[in-house]
Image (spheres, helix red, strand yellow):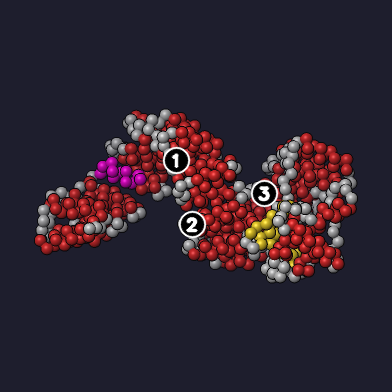
Amino acid sequence: MKVKQKLHQAIDLLYSNGPTSFDDYTRLVLHCVRANDFIQAKRLQSHMELHLFQPKDSFIHNQLIHLYAKLGRLADAQNVFDNMTKTDVYSWNALLSAYAKMDMVEKLHVVFDQMPYRDSISYNTLIAYFANNGNSGKALRVLMRMQEEGFQPTHHSYVNALQACSQLLDLRHGKQIHGKIVVTKLGENTFVRNAVTDMYARCGDIDRARWLFDRMINKNVVSWNLMISGYVKLGKPDECIHLFDEMQLSTLKPDIVTFSNVLNAYFQCGRVDDARNIFSKLPKIDEICWTTMIVGYAQNGRDEDSLMLFGDMLRRNVKLDNYTISSVISSCAKLASLHHGQVVHGKVILVGIEKDMLVLSALVDMYSKCGVTLDAWVVFETMPIKNIITWNAMILGYAQNGQVPEALALYERMQQENFKPDNITFVAVLSACINANTVKEGQKYFDAISEQGMTPTLDHYACMVTLLGRSGRIDKAVDLIQGMPHKPNCRIWSTLLSVCAKTDLKSAELAANYLFEFEPHNAGPYIMLSNLYAACGRWKDVAVVRSLMKEKSAKKFAAYSWVEVGNEVHRFVSEDHSHLEAGKIYGELNRLISILQNIGYNPDINIVLHNVGEKEKFRSISYHSEKLALAFALIRKPNGIEPIRIIKNIRVCDDCHVFMKFASITIGRPIIMRDSNRFHHFFDGKCSCKDNW
């Protein structure tokens, strides 16, 4: 027979027989507490009141208060307390605990202040409540009051106080508490020792934490996890992995918390495959490990793997949270995978987190980066509450998609609604000015940064260098750099080099020389300067730069494009023959080139900056990665009406830009291309960037 059923029958029998003894009431109330049975406890309480039973001490009523508090029945707990003829410190502590569990801080203060007598449990209840609810300063003040009023802190007092120090990153107070623990000889308690070690680790003194950890006699799994977690949080993944290896040699087995931290460490090291190997062998996987893997993939540029793993997570019905979903949405944004983004948006609604700020901000960003600013706007406008992150995402989305008036109007509206712009807001606004090539407007917003009481950052200066450089004012861009309050970094010099033309070789050489010094192994500056020399026909200088690049072992990263077709992402590099359908792709592309040539397209072989023949130049320019991506999309969906979305990891070249404009006429479909600078919406022979990129 079930316990609750037996309890019900016992109290039925009690009502049949009348009053009973103190021992019987005590036994029955303890059964109610063990069974968490509120209904039978209330019947028992009513029976005692009916027969005017007065217990000889407060034990029975204290048990009822604890049970009612545990089950969230505060009014019942208070009623029992108010009708007690005799209360003691245990009664007051029971009521205090009840208000703490129900997060009723004002009542908590009132009860504590009214207590005619207190003990260490009374103080510990308050310390634990404040430490666990983000009010660490109050927790430490209660500990101080406890000592001033003559009560000796227990190991629970110190553990919760150390937690408060960790939250405040207050190493000074943490050390003081550690000293008192040593004096009172509580430091040998593993529970306390773990708390001390964790406090040092969280406050940044990882070496002291490790010293204490190494001297612990009775380590448990929590001890190892705290130390491993400390290394991960301080960005020392190698130490974390070494400690994990040590743990595996001990008699203790890692738990799911251990593995979650170690997965994080592998991702911090860039050892993605090692993380996957551990993950695949876990006997039990919780939501934290799934999220760690998804976020880790995304942070290491493995966004496709992130989406695939998310699919596995859905198939296994793993519980989703806002952090997991926002990370997946960010991967959709990076890949410009509108289909996957829409699917995840549907899941957001299904799991009921469609009002979460983190998720909604990610959706605004995702739709913007897929070139669908209308959907981004719908999400933005329907948000119940907006913050600066969402405003920035929408303004930047408009700016990147060439909708400059909308971006600047939204900036003005943001200020009217009393949202103060931050550094990212001004990057977004300046980006809009760059895409519209409006130097005067850009200067106005750049000046507004100081007017808002902020100091322009290097990102803001980089935007202004781009704006001035693209408008042909390289001399003013150089003056701006030389007058900066900050020391120019690689981004500033790289920006200057990227906007220099054949007529600006002196400034280009200035920028390149700084970059050769700061980033000797980065191939980008060598290639940019080499291309400028080639454009001027200075082939000897080209040879010198390329020789220097080889001498420094500078590695060129691959330029590629990708396109989503049939819910799959396909990636291409220039003159790529690795795709399974390469023959069809080249056939379709050659057919398209021939059609476009008949309506006025003429491949611009002059942009091929290599000293080779015209045939080689024509082949080189014809099979750029974005053209292959377009041809593949046309093979798979020749009669589609949806836009073709192509992503390129570097700036689209002049010839491909012209090619896409002509192609948009022939295929009668929009082509949306996102390159490293901005979005290009091609339709009916025109581009949203108005040839300014």
Q: Disc 1 or disc 3, which is closer to the eye?
A: 1
- Quadrant of the snapshot with the C terminus: bottom right
**Residue 190 disc label:** none
Judged left or right of residue 235, residue 107 is: left
Reading the chain from its start, which is encountered first: label 3 or label 2? 2
Mark 2 and 1 residues: CB-CB less than 8 Å, in contact? no
- Secondary structure of residue under mark 1: loop
> Disc 3 and disc 2: Cα gap in Å?
43 Å
Are the residues at dot 3 and dot 2 in contact (C-beta closer than 8 Å)?
no
Q: Does 258 lie within the magenta span?
A: no
**Image depth: mark 2 or mark 1 in front:** 2
Provide the residue designation for mark 3: 459
**Identity, as a three-letter code, of the amino acid under mark 3:** Asp
Q: CA distance from mark 1 to mark 3?
A: 44 Å
Which residues are the magenta region?
A: 118-128
Which class describes the residues within 10 Å of circle 1: few (<14), some (14-19), or many (20+)?
A: some
Task: Residue 11 in the image: state x and y as whole percent.
Answer: 17, 60
Residue 89 or 629: which is nearer the viewer?
629
Answer whether residue 122 is magenta in the image.
yes
The residue type indicated by label 2 comes to Arg
Name the residue rendered at 54%, 57% in the picture.
Answer: 311
Spot occupied by residue 310 in the image (x, y as percentages of width and height): 54, 55
Q: Nearer the viewer, residue 607 or 361?
A: 607
Quarter that holds the N terminus:
bottom left
The kind of residue on which mark 1 rests is Pro
Q: Which mark is residue 316?
A: 2
Q: Which mark is residue 254?
A: 1
Q: Position of residue 639 (x, y in %)?
A: 71, 70
* SS at badge 3: helix
Left or right of 43? Residue 642 is right
Q: Main secondary structure of the magenta part?
A: helix
Q: Position of residue 351 (x, y in %)?
A: 48, 62
